[in-house]
Amino acid sequence: MAKKKVLVTGGAGFIGGNFVQYMVKKYPQYDIYNLDLLTYAGDLMKHKEIESEENYHFVKADITDRETIIPLFENEKFDCVVHFAAESHVDRSITDPEIFVKTNVLGTQVLLDSAKQIGVSKFLHVSTDEVYGELDFDPNTFFTEDTPLQPNSPYSASKASSDLLVRAYHETFGLPINITRCSNNYGPFHFPEKLIPLTISRVLKDQKIPVYGDGKNIRDWLHVLDHCAAIDLVLHEGENGEVYNVGGHNECTNLEVVQTIISALGKSEELIEFVTDRLGHDKRYAIDPSKLEQLGWKPTYTFETGIAQTIQWYLDNKEWWEQIISGEYKNYFETQYTL
Ligand code: NAD
Ligand code: TYD
């Protein structure tokens, strides 16, 4: 019998990369296709361990390139699609919103057209809790799947737009879909422009840590492997057309996150530097994951266990992140911060 073909877009990035490795190892009976353009955020160094596995395949392509993507779907006849590829960094969306519209909105629409044309059995769109906007600091309020979409940044607006297109292809054309909306992920292979890997890599070099505003903004941290398990579950068991929120009930202020890392690495809080706040900085994100828990998902990491594992991973894998911070990223850092 032919193997099931699973297309993963953005599988050279942080979450998609972890998901590709998870799927290649867990499902030898599936062929996993990693489609990625290898932008600044994607690399194949992370896949050294799986690159020679029989069920792993890499395709370098741009999801916005209809002339390539449609024939690829026609030739390969993918059974299902798990769509991660995106521009994902809020700060970059503030300085250059256009690429976010192109990749996140147009790219998703090209994939939806391609999936519709060949009739996939599922199109799983990986989205974000940021599409719901922000919560205030009342600890009893959470995002549910019914919270209205009120994105505040160009990044979250582009993700919300793509969510609406996915919904529309389900309602109009009957495309089988799921949308997952997760909170902030952390873990191995997290690109060092994001708060946690940026802090770990800079603390290890005794460099200043830029904390936006007063550091009191709250994020709800989810270990990437818990996220992979959630996507696996929704891919196999998710009810057609449904949205699932994914979050681990791990709320921390940004300052707490930075202090935890500094303390774990035995360094001084003098490394913290409060800098000008991000424009339109969302105050708080917090997820109510009960719908997904009813489907059978439970996070295995607390923030304490997950951050300890992640710090250790960055200590053990300096070669990976050292290469990244010495490349194109260096120019980005110098334009973004004046530390
Ligand atoms: P990432 O930036 O680490 O990786 C994105 C990947 O997409 C990269 O490998 C990049 O090369 C690829 N890509 C970009 N443009 C492309 C194009 N035009 N064609 C093909 N590939 C392209 O992102 P991530 O943090 O792994 O996030 C993955 C998904 O999860 C995104 O859709 C993001 O919106 C969503 N998400 C992320 C988080 C988080 O905390 N990181 C939280 C919620 C949702
Ligand atoms: P980030 O990792 O960029 O994720 P997101 O914006 O998608 O939540 O940022 C997490 C939080 O950390 C966010 O509130 C902004 C803050 N932050 C800083 O304080 N300093 C930084 O240098 C960065 C990158 C983020």
Image: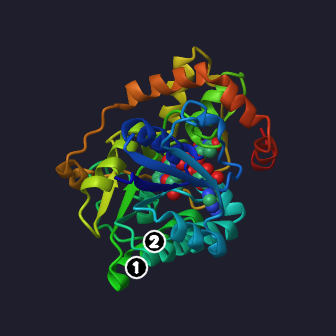
Relative image position of residue 42 (x, y in whole percent): 65, 47
Relative image position of residue 70 (x, y in whole percent): 57, 73
Relative image position of residue 2 (x, y in whole percent): 38, 54
Q: Residue at x 59, y 67 (%)?
A: 154
Confirm or deny contact between disc 2 and disc 1 (CB under 8 A). yes
Identify whether 304 is placed above or below 178: above
Residue flagged by tag 1: what amino acid is it?
A: Tyr
Identify whether 216 is placed above or below 92: above
Q: Nearer the viewer, residue 220 or 298?
A: 298
SS for callout 2: helix
Q: Residue at x 79, y 34 (%)?
A: 326
Q: Quadrant of residue 196?
A: top right
| Distance from mark 2 CB to nearest ligand 1 atom below 8 Å | no
Identify whether 135 is placed above or below 159: above
Q: Which residue is mark 2?
A: 115
The label on residue 38 is: none
Q: Residues within 10 Å of mark 2 (few under 14, many from 20)?
A: many
Q: Residue at x 66, y 35 (%)?
A: 45
Residue placed furthest toward the top = 266
How far is disc 2 from disc 1 in space, using C-alphas?
10 Å
Q: Nearer the viewer, residue 10 or 321?
A: 10
| Label whose residue precedes the other's in the sequence (2 or 1) | 2
Quadrant assignment for the C terminus = top right
The label on residue 169 is: 1
SS for callout 1: helix
Residue flagged by tag 2: what amino acid is it?
A: Ala
